[in-house]
Image (cartoon, helix red, strand yellow):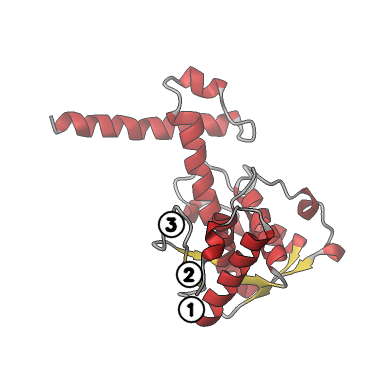
Amino acid sequence: MDKEWIKLPRYSSEYIDGVEFFLNYAYTNGKPQGGEILCPCAKCHNTCWEVRAIVYDHLIGKRGKTKCLEAHARSLEDRVEIILNEYEVPIGPNQRSVVQFSNFLGTVARSSDFCPLVYTNWKVVPDKDLIWTYIKQKYIIPDVGKKAIFAIINDAWRRHKCAIKEEHFTKYKTTYERLKNRPKDIPESHFKELIRYWSLGNIQVKLLNFSLC
């Protein structure tokens, strides 16, 4: 398969057409595993299995966090239908709708109301039924897609948490500096809990290094 498109400038129509052709080819003629394919982006280098929307995001890139205000303001009558493949992964009605849906799920994952970062892992995040109900208020999607959709949110939630740690915890040395530079979309009480949790991890690493000396 010709991959010359990958050398073209991002956001050019030829590059985006190449990405869509690659994804269609990979899902039609490739060997997807559970609805996931190996992502060929510069970071993954064909070593990470991802769903279609995530691969698209990795290859296209983003110009900043999207807020998807239109989707969040959508009424029941204006909902967009999402089509799933045999693995219950979103594939339609078209690539644009899939990407917009993926971006919408990203905003849900970054919401402190739906997915607080204070939990150690996605499994213990509570009220997932409320998350699913909200998604179905904005999109028409079969319940069989719930597991795959939550996998996308889980991935976005973990990446968001890693980014927050890197930019607002690791970057600063003191609790004062960290609180002063707290991300505005995370409640102060939540961020204090994150600082406490991440600081315990740093202490454990230091103790381990000391014990190895």
Front-most of residues 188 and 86: 86
Cβ atoms under marks 2 and 1 closer than 8 Å: yes
Identify the mark nearer the N-term, 2 or 1: 1
Q: Amino acid at mark 3?
A: Cys
Mark 3 lies on residue? 44
| Residue 199 visible | yes
Mark 2 lies on residue? 37
Give the residue drawn at x 72%, y 73%: 93
Q: Amino acid at mark 1?
A: Gly
Front-most of residues 78 and 10: 10
Residue 55: % across, % down = 54, 61
Identify the mark nearer the N-term, 1 or 3: 1
- Left or right: where 21 falls relative to 119: right
Mark 1 lies on residue? 30
Front-most of residues 53 and 182: 53
Separation of disc 2 and disc 1 at Cα?
Answer: 8 Å
